[in-house]
Image (tube, rainbow, N blue to C red):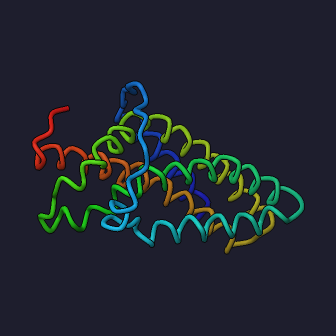
Amino acid sequence: MRYRVHLLTALFVATVGVVGIPVAAVAQQNAPTAAAQKQSPTPHSLLAEHITVQGRLNELAREPGAVGTTAKKILAVMVPHDKREEEFVFPLLGLVDDLAAGKAGPDMAWALAMSDRVKAEQKQLYTEHSAIIAAVNELAAAARDRHDANLEAFAEEVAASEVNDGEVEYPTAILVGMYLRTQLKVAK
């Protein structure tokens, strides 16, 4: 079990290293309008995961010793990172169902700048994930030290989720913008 967290870290680092994404100047972008957000709600499952994980880490942060210290360390990186994902990654993922159903329209044009921002900030997002995973590895080690299989499993789930963000969510958010550009015939 303990090797799974380290394997996930290695896979994440290898993926980031292989991708080698150049970072352009960060695109500044306003959040989508209220009307756009109604048409493209953030997937509830993603928000629920953030709330659940942060809630559990907040509980752990109240514990003494290595577990509490490490939970605080994870939260220090994770909370601002998750807020950024909710701001400019998740709204794009909320468009996927409509786009898969062939529903692309000019009311989705707000997503273009947001997708460009994901691409521009992808390296920074990966760096934050690496920091989160490193701290999660520390949490898994603390769980092993106190023979807490449930806590170790939680750490492994958090690490797997962080890897998923880099392997699936960010590329999908970028593809949303690329697809919309072709559908709306907007040049970059």
Q: Is residue 90 left or right of residue 188?
A: right
Depth check: 86 or 21 in front?
86
Depth check: 141 or 47 in front?
47
Report the label total.
Answer: 0
The furthest residue to the bottom: 150
| Location of residue 29 in the rendering, given as x and y in whole percent from the top left corner | 41, 40
Q: Which of the 4 image quarters holds residue 94?
A: bottom left
Depth check: 152 or 115 in front?
115
| Location of residue 15 in the rendering, given as x and y in whole percent from the top left corner | 39, 41
| Location of residue 113 in the rendering, given as x and y in whole percent from the top left corner | 32, 40
Q: Is residue 51 left or right of residue 61?
A: left
Q: Is residue 134 above or below residue 39?
A: above
Placement of the C terminus among the 4 image quadrants: top left
Q: Residue at x 62, y 51 (%)?
A: 78
Q: Residue at x 70, y 64 (%)?
A: 57
Q: Residue at x 19, y 61 (%)?
A: 99
Q: Is residue 171 left or right of residue 14?
A: left
Q: Is residue 86 above or below residue 12?
A: below
Q: Is residue 89 left or right of residue 186?
A: right
Placement of the N terminus among the 4 image quadrants: bottom right
| Location of residue 93 in the rendering, given as x and y in whole percent from the top left corner | 34, 59
